[in-house]
Every structure is written in structure tokens, then in C-alpha cells.
Image (cartoon, rainbow, N blue to C red):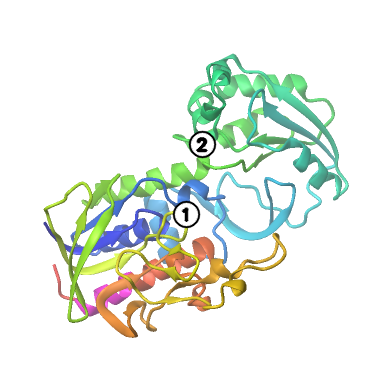
Amino acid sequence: MRFDTLIIGGGLAGLLAGISLQKAGRKTAIVSTGQNSLYFFSGTFESVEEPSERLRELLSECGIRVHYSPGVRFMPLGTFRDSALSLEDISLFPTPEIARKALIVNFAGYLDFFSSFISEGLSRHGASCRMVTLDMPELSRFHQNPDEMRSAQIARALDSNWEKVVKEVCVMLHDEDTVILPQVFGLQDAEIPEKIRRGIPARVIFTGTLPPSVPGIRTQMLLKRRYEVLGGTYLSGDEVVGAHLYEGTVHSVVTRNLEGHYLEAGHFILATGGYFSKGLKSNPFQVYEPLFGLDVDYSEDRNAWYAPSFAADQPYMNYGVKTDEHLHALLQGNPVSNLLVAGSVLGATHPELGSGAGLAIRSAFAAVDQILKASPDQA
């Protein structure tokens, strides 16, 4: 099978690149192992200043609604983080003083939402907090197996019962001005969080949980749907297991599910993510890129990989694949002419591209621009 561009990785960077190239009339395929960084997505696009028209247009076409309001967002462990561009259902505030009295609502048996940490965090900023538990019969089947009591499963059950949640919360509400709910609504319908807000006579804040992330899964589904509507080929649950390079050019790759069939392309984008998705791996001696054996920027002193404080920025998280200034991957110091790199597999090798979601967005667009510049007349 032959494509104009083959993208390895179906996370935020891979999908943005695929959508952009499909819109430009290119024939692309994305190979995705399944879960990716979007399953951990907080709903906030880190390190993105005011979004470009290009990004706004792409997200809007996908049905992803965002708002831009520089300030802070409330985190799952009761802390605050500077934020600016977020999904529409993620609340942003000018300061951490967000409540006078807060009602913190969790669901019976749900262990991935930390009410006590949230209460402590709000109390530090002057709020009086009351914690309550909502026992929903619709969730009782999950109580038999705690592994099933996860955000995505709860969302599937409650998205058709959100009105009942509103009624129950209204009964529990006393004189609180703010209600804190876990971010387990709107998996299929992004309007549900706003409907809940309109139904409760207090400010409603949806606070993150342990992964998987409901807004992240929803974002991934909307991006994937748009990519496929544009004609892209999305190979889900597959993995690139081999690559063929000759004289500094990638000619084809082989996947686990299509063993014996070469996937050929004029260009390739490596968007395999960081350590979680195995885009980067390590052993006691090195940090390495497992698919192509690309050059990786890391310290040879293993003691320098870690900071003594657990809460500190860990140096190994900044390691990533080396590229030239145009994001062509480096192999033994030489650029691979048709292999570009995007997303968190870059680590902090290009600080000008930002971090987190900002890195994914900027590097994906930069890789696309390089491909279109290299072959502007390609149909």
C-alpha cells in the first residue's frame, strides 16, 4: 500500500498532522496502537498562547469547542495551574480564590476523585468545604469490580442520566455558591456539562480525575472522526514493528497486523509519544528510540536522569529525539530526508515549540508545512 504520508502515532500530534494533510489533498494513513496521550489530556492546551486562526479553524471543523482566558485552572489534587486555552467545559479563573462555600460531590465507590485533596486545596484559598457522596443506582453494576469504576464507564452510564444527577445535587445543596463535580460527563455529547451547569443554582466546576480522561477521549474521537471523514486511513490497534531505510531515506514500514505487506510513503511522521506510549524507551545505560534507532538527546550520566525531589521537574522527561531545525530526524548525526518528528517524542529538544499539548500542536503543523513545502505540486 502506498501513501503520500504515513504517520506513526494516533495522538494529538498525529491526528492534527493527518487532518491538515488530508485537507491539503494528500493521501495519508495513521498507525495507532490504541491508547495515547489524549487519554491523559487534562482539557487544557499547555504552553499555547492565544491560539492561531489555523488551530481555531481546525478544532472548530472537528466540533471541538475551546475558550481562551489566561488565568488558572483547578487541578485534581487541589492545586492551581496557569492555563489559557482550554476545552469549553474546563473552567478557568483569574485567581485561585474561586469559592466562598463549596459542595464537593463524588459518586459512591469512585476512588479516582480525591475529595479530601480538593477540599484542602480550596480551604487554603479561603473556601469552606462540605463533602458529600452521591449513590447512583445506574453505577451499582460497577461496584462489583473496582477496575470497572473508571471515568469513561461512569460517563457512559451518566450521560443519559445527567438530569437525575442535577436533581440529586440540588437536593444536597444548602447555601454553597460552588459545586465541584468529577469530570465524568460529556463523553459523547460535549453539551452535557453546560446543561448540568444551567440546572444547578450554583457555579459548577468539573475537576479532573485519574485517567482515562473523559474530555481527552472525546477529543480523540472527534479528531479521528474528522480525519476519517476527510478520507484518511486510520489503522487502529496496530503497531509499526519494522522500517526500511536506504541512503538516508525511509522507504517503507511493516506493521504487526499487516505483516508481509509494506506500507510505502513519500514522507513519514514519527509521532509515537514519550515513555508511556513507548515512543521512547530506556535501559540502565541509555534512553533510545526503538523503531528507527534515531539519535536521542540524553545525559550519559544516569545519575543526572533524576532530580532528588519527587515533585521536581525530572530531567529524563526532557529527553527526546534529535532533529535538525526543520524537524527531520537525525540518525548517526545525519538527517533522514523524509522522516519528520512531532509531539512528545521530541522531549524538550526544541524549547521554542513549548511543552505538552502546545508542543504537539506546533510540531505537527511545522512537520506538515515541511512536507507541503517539499512537494507543493503533489496531488
Of mark 1 and mark 2, the one earlier in the sequence is 2
Q: Name the kind of residue labelled 2 in the image.
A: Glu
- Toward which corner of the image does residue 322 lie, by quadrant? bottom left
Is residue 297 depicted above or below 201 in this figure?
below
**Left or right side of 56 for 316:** right
- Toward which corner of the image does residue 151 lie, by quadrant? top right
Q: Which mark is residue 276?
A: 1
Q: Residue at x 37, y 52 (%)?
A: 61
What quarter of the picture does the C terminus occupy? bottom left
Q: Is residue 241 among what the camera can see?
A: yes
Residue segment shown in magenta: 368-375
Q: What SS does tag 2 mark?
A: loop
Q: Name the kind of residue labelled 1 in the image.
A: Phe
Q: Residues within 10 Å of mark 2 (few under 14, many from 20)?
A: some
**Left or right side of 274 for 199:** right
Q: Does the magenta portion include 373? A: yes
Q: Are marks 1 and 2 in contact (CB under 8 Å)?
A: no
Q: What SS does tag 1 mark?
A: loop
Find disc 2 in the rendering and name its residue: 191
> Where residue 268 appears, x then y in whole percent?
25, 67
